Image (spheres, rainbow, N blue to C red):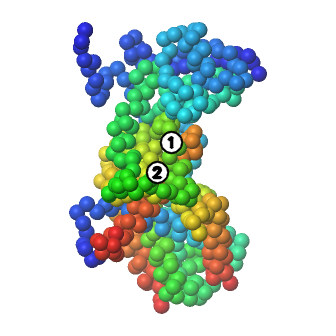
Amino acid sequence: MPKGVEHKRPIEPLLWLLFSAGGVLAALFVPVLLFLFGLAFPLGWLPAPSHSHMLALFGHPITRIVLFVLCVLSLFFWAHRFRYTLYDGLQIKHLNEVINVLCYGGAIVGSIVAGYILWQVPH
Amino acid sequence: MNQQPNYTEHHPRWYRTRVSTYWWLEKPAYFLFILRELSSVFVAWFVVFLLMLVAAVTGGAESYRQFLAWAARPGVVALNVVSLLFVLLHTITWFNLAPQAMAVRFRGKRVPGIWIAGSNYAAWVIVSGVVLWLIVQ
Amino acid sequence: MPDRISLQVLRYRPEQEAEPTVQEFEVPCHKDWVVLDGLNYIKDRLDGSLTYRWSCRMGICGSCGMTVNGEPKLTCATFLSEYAPGPVQVAPLRNFPIIRDLVIEMGDFMRKLPEVKPWIIRKEEKPLAEGEYLQTPEQLDDYKQFSMCINCMLCYAACPVVGLDSHFLGPAAIALAQRYNLDSRDQGAAERLEVLSQHEGIWGCTFVGECTKVCPKNVDPAGAIQRYKLKATIEWLKSFFMPRGAR
């Protein structure tokens, strides 16, 4: 950051950037992953991959980077949309600050947890 | 006779309506919008579910087996079915709105919207294929 | 097709009632009659006190926008026969205060519009002797769609955010700002960005998309706003990575 944060530099572009990137990644990755691990494997439609295969897959640095980025951006995508849904859907804009802390704070905490869990995979 | 009319910003005789809390039930398009927005909640649930899976795999073969057994419980399956429907709604609405949100130019000409949406869907097919190939043995 | 149709018109006469009421009229339903013709029939033959705005009856002036069966419509371009056998509900546009009957108060929009500076801004006007500013057909195409706006306010009536947040600039004003930003003769994009990148500018929009659907001139305000978000974000990123002079 060469010039530092300017006084009136808005935060919205950053939040929107995270939201859009998260929206794209979630749209691309989540349906297939949720279908496999949420339905196909537990219900036996497809044979579940062996533990050693999953361990090798999650242990690979690229997988972990992709999953970390997917988790972080998806959480910010959630935070941004859910914030506006609470604002407009329930008309509780006066609780602005509480909602912001709940949504974006939740995304930050979730990102840290995601980083920790993914780091814990033996590699 | 020559009295100036008294214009005020909040004219007492203007009738003002307030937007209902349930405005999103007033039109099908609004309702679809709110469903689209709520899809984000299920994306967040997916992140939780994914991290539980990763933690289970880290925990060893037995905890991975337990995770799959837990994921097969009716309540969890039901939640994931609903989540999948919402996530698909997200994917479809996101790709369909993409041409409106960006104007791509190629050799000075605006690329038709169907190409932008189409390339998004193509990317979706490729990503899904690669993920399937990596995971399914 | 029945030769008559019932119009349920919202009436609000502030000198005699505190709340709007619905009054029903029977009007002829000719094949070529629009809702506005029905209202004119009422005013001419049935009740001269009915108050509404109209002028050109051909989708140019943008003054006859009303809510027809719940949807914002130009009443001059909405055929009565589409709603046969009726009844047809006619109400003022939503999200605006009602002055009388079907007439809304749009001063709020009139105050917001100049904030986005919807005119061509030049850093320096070139001397008259150098002639006009030339534009290629491609350059015209860049902004032409957004220049078709007739300020009919249908998009404001369709937008839930306008109703929920009175500070939101709204679809038409932002689309008009974009019309000038995309004009090759204009140099005022940075000035407009100041206004539009506030929370009440583009960031208030949640892309419901209804403004575009109801627009009688195919302006696509929703698209304009989303593209503006992208542009504002790129400018924001540039401010980090590029020295001041290069911007």
Q: Is residue C156 visible?
A: yes
Numbered badge on residue C168 = none
Q: Secondary structure at mark 1?
A: loop
What is the x, y in percent for residue B133?
67, 81
Query: What residue do we see at 52% from left, 72% from top?
Result: B50
Query: What residue do we see at 42% from left, 25% from top?
Result: C98
Q: Provide the residue designation for mark 1.
A: C149
Furthest residue toward right: C1
Which residue type does callout 1 highlight?
Answer: Cys
Between residue B129 and residue C55, name the one nearer to us. C55
Q: Secondary structure at mark 2?
A: helix
Whether tag 1 and tag 2 are in contact, CB under 8 A, the answer is yes
Q: Quadrant of residue B108?
A: bottom right
The correct choice, above or below, for C192 with respect to C57 in the image is: below
Q: Chain of mark 2?
A: C
Classify residue B3 as left or right of residue A118.
left
What is the x, y in percent for residue B23?
49, 38
Quarter containing the N terminus of chain C:
top right
Q: Are marks 1 and 2 on the same chain?
A: yes
Which residue type does callout 2 highlight?
Answer: Arg
Q: Which of pointers 1 and 2 lies earlier in the amino acid sequence?
A: 1
Q: Provide the residue designation for mark 2.
A: C179
Q: Residues within 10 Å of mark 1 (few under 14, many from 20)?
A: many
Query: What residue do we see at 51% from left, 53% from top?
Result: C143
